Image (tube, rainbow, N blue to C red):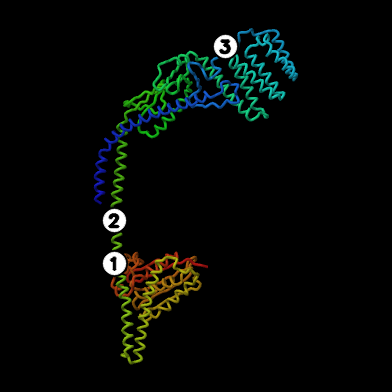
Amino acid sequence: MLPTAILSVLSFRNIQSETFLAQKTFTENRENFQKELEDAFTKEQEKIFQETRASSLFLYELPKSLLEFGNAAAYKDVRGIKSIFLYNEGNLVYPDIASRRFYNTDGTANFPSKNANVQNMLGLVRLAYQNKDYNEALKYLKILEQAPRLSGFLQTDLTRSVNLLHFEILVKQKRHQEAEEYCLSILSQFLQSESIEDIPSTKFFFESAFTQILSFDDLARDKREAFWNLRNNFNRQLYHMETLSKHKELFQDLLEDEHLAKNGILFRTNEGISLLRMSSPQLSGKQVVIAEIAPDAFRARILERLKGVAQGWKNIPFSIIDEKDSILLGSIPDSSEILAQSHITSAYSWEISFYEKDMKEIRQESRQKMYLMYGLLFFSLITVILGSIFMLRFVIQEHKLLAMKANFLSSVSHELKTPLTSIKMFAEMMARGRVAKVEKVQEYSGLIGKEANRLENLIGAILNYTRMEHGTGAFKWEKLDFSVCAKKVFEAVEDIGVEKGLEFSTRFEPNAFVMGDYTALYSLAQNLIENAIKYTNAPGNITINVHNEEDHTVFSVADTGIGIASSEQKNIFNDFYRVGDEMTRSTKGSGLGLAIVKRVVETHKATISLSSKPGKGSTFIVRFRKVD
């Protein structure tokens, strides 16, 4: 109890200072939260840098020419990065076709748009194609593609249309090998040209051609993989060409900028595009990587990391605002003072703000903690008090049990000693010849037999009790007629009751079958009937009844004896317990009879009930499960 009292005093002192502690805890938590947010942002951004660096090193290993398509590999994507450009000593290394000279991609070239010979040749191609004379159509198409005096007059987008028609005729004729070689030859011409014209029509031709080649059933596995990689890398490089041509000045300005951060990272946003420059110490030598940032993916990736951190700090008001004053995470509380702010420098300028928490919320949280602590303290005190009460009851009960055991040992010793003394005394008198008359010898012999029976019954009760302690394993289960068992008990003790001047009324209905141990059931019937005889004075009546009742076999013993007080009825089935009145003290017994009865009833899954009033008698009723 003393440690509990000391703990209670200390707990009360801590509870009283809970509001102050809550304010202090909020300040510490806010500082830790701010640090975790900034660290998470830095780490996730650094992870993007590392992935971009790894992807750039991978790109250095790609084939120098796209025509080496058999060795081309899949591109390593970086979430948050749209495209990557590699420079070494100021020269563009990847993509290898992005440094070409571009014409305006408005669908026009620097040649006349019409020529009579070209129009006539196209008319012949159209007529042959409609008549499915594919060889004739291919002849005219080759003339258009190979004759400089004619092909020079084709518009760029019309040239790609001629190329696509040539390719599709080869496909219709099932000349798949020639179609593959023709597509690669057009690609070779495209890559070897000094200038790039009309990127949209070029993209359409090669996307259509590559898609059809990949659908060929007879395409070998290694070729299919090669064309797949070629298509992906070529489309990616065409996108790079468009990006570089559109923002060439911004790329050049970023490449020549010498004001780099210590970590070798520089951001630049202009004209709707955000670029990231990476150089030494991130890369070796004069290598430079310029990466185009994918705004939505970049923001989403970092915000996911920050949301994960914010999950553990739900009670701290904060907000993250972008360069457009849009709230990305958290919220701005009404009329709350800003405690701290920090700016995160990256491709986008974000501001993290932390706000003062409402004192009402702090008090409410502290009150909740106080109530919880009071509750825990009250619970601990109640637990200690109840534990002490139960422990005291246990000690008292144990003391009573020890007293009952001592009383039992004393009673048993007395009960054993009394018949032994009588047996010894009568036996010695007869052995020494002091009893000469035959009538006396018979009388003493009868007394010796009576005392021996009494001694046998006492020892049997002790043995039965001991056997009950070992549980159901000590029983021999069988189907038996309880009426026969109870009748044998009655016949064995009837003389005792008759000599005492008692009258009996019995009913033993046949076929009262139960499943049980014969010895245990015999002991049950014996104890109940003998108790009725013991505690009933003449003139008195004892009624013994065994009958069937639907699903049960019922055994009842009723007497007109001294009865049992209601306050004693809950204890009479306890081990060694005897009712403490003059009648029971003067009546010989061990205190085990009804305890044995209870054990037998529980073991046989039966029920026992008692109805008794002092001076009016008692009725014990046992109900067993009937067995057909």
395, above or below 350, in the image: below
Find out whether the residues at labels 3 and 1 contact each other: C-beta distance under 8 Å: no
The CA distance from mark 3 to mark 2 is 99 Å
Q: Nearer the viewer, mark 1 or mark 2?
A: 1
Which sits in the foreground, 358 or 537? 358
- Mark toward the start of the polypeptide (1 vs 2): 2
Instruction: Please give left or right for residue 173 compared with residue 298 in the image.
Output: right
Give residue 574's quadrant in the image: bottom left
Residue 347 visible in the shown view: no
Secondary structure under tag 2 reads helix
Residue type, mark 2 in image: Ile
Secondary structure under tag 3 reads loop
Tell me the residue at 26%/49% (across/down): 4
- Mark toward the start of the polypeptide (3 vs 2): 3
- Disc on res. 278: none
Residue type, mark 3 in image: Tyr
Secondary structure under tag 1 reads helix
Which sits in the foreground, 379 or 340? 340
- Mark toward the start of the polypeptide (3 vs 1): 3
Q: Nearer the viewer, mark 3 or mark 2?
A: 3
- Disc on res. 103: 3
Tell me the residue at 65%/29% (across/down): 220
Give residue 172's quadrant in the image: top right
Which sits in the foreground, 399 or 194? 194
Tell me the residue at 50%/21% (across/down): 84
Q: Position of residue 512 (x, y in %)?
A: 49, 71
User: Callout 3: few (<14), some (14-19), or many (20+) C-alpha neighbours within 10 Å?
Assistant: some
Q: Position of residue 348 (x, y in %)?
A: 42, 21
For disc 2, the marked residue is 389
For disc 1, the marked residue is 403
